[in-house]
Amino acid sequence: MSLRKNRIQIESKWQNIWSENNIFETSNSSLKKRKYILEMFPYPSGKIHVGHLRNYTIGDVVSRFYIANDFAVLHAMGWDSFGLPAENAAMKHQVHPAKWTYENISIMKSQLKKIGLSYDWQRELITCDPEYYKFEQEFFIDLFNKKLAYKKLSPVNWDPIDKTVLSNEQVVDGKGWRSGAKIEKKYLNQWFLKITDYAEELLTSLDKMNGWPEKIRNMQRNWIGKSDGHIIKFKVEGFDKKEIHAFSTRIETIFGASFIAVSHEHDITEILSEEIYKKLQKFQQKLMVYKNEEFYLNTGIKAIHPVTGHLIPIIIASYVLADYATGAVFGCPAHDKRDHKLANFLKLPILQVIDNDDSTNIDIMSQPYETKEGFMINSSFLNGLDITSAKKEINNYLANLNVLEKKHIYKLRDWCISRQRYWGAPIPIIYCPKCGTIAAKKEDLPIKLPQDVSITHSGTVLQDHPSWKYIKCHICQSPAVRETDTFDTFFESSWYYFKFATPNQNYMISQKEEEQWFPVDKYIGGIEHAVIHLLYSRFFTKVLSDLGYIKVREPFLSVIPQGMVLHKTYKDLEDNWIYPNDVKKLDDGSLVHKITNKTVIEGQEEKMSKSKCNVIDLEEGLEKFGADVLRLFVLSDTPIDKELLWSENNITSIEKFLTKLINLVNIVNSHIEFLQKEDDFLENALNSTIKKVTSDIKLLNLNLAIANIRKLVNVIKEYVSKNEKFSISVKKSVFVILQLFNPFIPHITEELWNNLGKNTSLVKEKWPIYEESKIKKDSYILAIQINGRLRAKQEFLDNLDDEEIQKKVFSLDSVKKYIGNRNIKKIIFVKRKIMNLILD
């Protein structure tokens, strides 16, 4: 068996066997334990590159491992198939988005099958299929009826190239996440979902989600952005019934307030003079163009300080947002950077009200003193108090004046789901001149997209369609019109994992399947989805639970962010990206373009990206190296959450190792007689390896699992090279090596297993079980730290896995007394040396 010559034939052979025999069809046996393994499904762009391979291979290894351990495993794949690229392709190539999308799905599905992934393809879903999106239309109607979906005129992020609205999350550095266009501000009537109603639960639930990396949980905490503060009521001079409610997290600085800053959309603008209002209009135009710069406009109106009675100006400031808290704050320039900048620009007073506890001089005019430590000065009855005491004192004082209200606020905004595009799921709303805004009848779902469209421009294709939007109101039979906006594509991807568990087309989610499979055990995908996709998925799960669809309140038990595959980048002198295959190295070491001979500049390694031309096409990789070689490469070199550098030298090393494995199996297979006596050394190596690899895969230390199997291969190879007669332990070890390696390199191991005389698929073989009695028991002393300080030492046997060691450490009285009720944020574990528990 030659690895290079026969790999395509071997891989195709076993892929066909798995497919023809429905090897990976999800078991419905109620007797089996269950695991739901899921990788984030792709957008069908047309081609998969090797950067995507790592994501899918991780999930495949874990799925195959649990299948071998007699679990019923749900492992499925689908396509996140709505979105702008299909419309752009339609305009460019004059092809219908559906045709472009389904052709791409066919190509990519073929590519995924060539990798040898263990998907139950009978559960495949395509989000642009009306049989899929009819359920989300039904779900939206429930949201609408529960007042969780609403429409309002609002400023939106308008992408002038894609001609659609983007959510705040889809705007990166002021530019559209897909088009790269500079985003403009517009006012449109948009549909929103009230995710803010769930802000507190979305935040507090994170504390219990120990299967999620702390980094991702912190990203979500920061995005939700809870602040505990107060609203202080300021009266407006000359307007007896007018008040400004200013939000503050630092009420102790109230004596230093020298102005009120409000949003340009604050209702104070209703009482501006005609002259100032004209200036406001120019201010707003400027704000649309220079989104990230700061501007100020003095309204000429003054507020009355609730404590001192002084008059302070009301300033419109670009840094105050209308939809954050009350859209107004009091400015204390001595102790806030933005307030300081505004006060200097408008030449307003800067009064220091906090001093430090040491003798350091503070030049408050040149920069603010923002440290939240010190004591109060220039603050009347607060003088001399520390900040904590001052907070309590001023709280009581303002409360007695009835001008203070405690308030929790969040940075999280309601989710705008309206998109002005054709290729999306229609929003099931009807506008009737008599009945108003009403939901479509569920019996009329799905509301399908019209097929007779010619997409010559982005944006309002449905609005411009001659007949699709016109309908009769199902309540009063009057002429009415449909909503012509479509759902944000995050709507589809925020619930698809439930549909995999419920292939029955009559239900969005079956409670029986939900109880069997949820939450998802392992959800694998890129860190770039840590906020938007995962947060929206959590929101949908909680709403679905409240609506009675399901019982779970969190969708994913464990989230695994895989590290990206990096590759060199190249540019020419005109700053155009160049494909690596088009670069030629000259004798003097310089780089040129193969065809044009123009100078090429080598850049840094970056995430594989089509836009940067540094992708390796999967078909090309499979043709050159084969599926098993690529699978082993993307998992061998680094932990799965770390970045991996594409290296053909390392891939060649993988090929050499697999050739060595094939040769070893052939040597053992050709050996006729084996000594029936077991070899103690080999038995120790074999059983230790089974134990380590089993633990490594459970803990997703896949690179360590591979390393441990390779060590066993080397042990057996060395034994075979030094002995003419082989112990039965050699034969046993070779069989186990193939079993342990099967989740990683399924094609080669299946073929070798078959060559050893086994007639059944290796996938169906039970995972090997180690014999503890055959493992040599060495021990070592582990130092146990808590927050970096040594708290205990404990002896451990060498054969214990990481999980067992952690369990023992947590049970030690000398450790438990320091942990108490505190959360363990992180565990730093250096094998055989030290374990450091980082607590809150």
Image (cartoon, grey):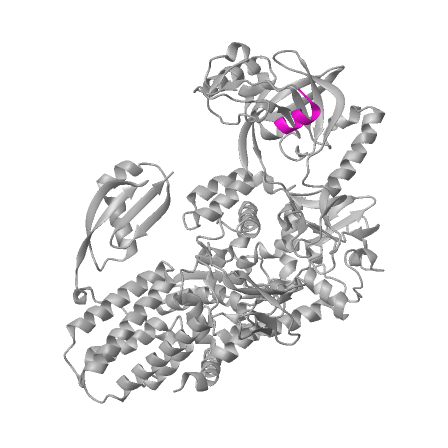
Front one among 516 and 199? 199
For the view shown, which residue lies furthest in the left direction?
Answer: 677
Residue range of the region highlighted in magenta in the rendering:
340-348
Q: Is residue 658 left or right of residue 523?
A: left
Q: Is residue 506 left or right of residue 116?
A: right
Image quadrant where one finds the N terminus:
bottom left
> In this view of the protein, can residue 650 be seen by the observer?
yes
Q: Is residue 58 left or right of residue 581?
A: left
Name the residue at 31% across, 65% down. Answer: 693
Q: Is residue 78 left or right of residue 328?
A: left
State whether residue 413 is above or below residue 758.
above
Name the residue at 52% across, 14% down. Answer: 377
Q: Locate residue 602, reporting x and y percent.
A: 56, 64
> Was residue 341 drawn as part of the magenta stretch in this picture?
yes
Front one among 180 and 85? 180
Q: Locate residue 361, reporting x and y percent.
A: 49, 21
Quadrant of the image occupied by residue 631: bottom left
> In this view of the protein, can residue 69 be seen by the observer?
no
Task: Determine the main secondary structure of the stretch shown in magenta.
Answer: helix
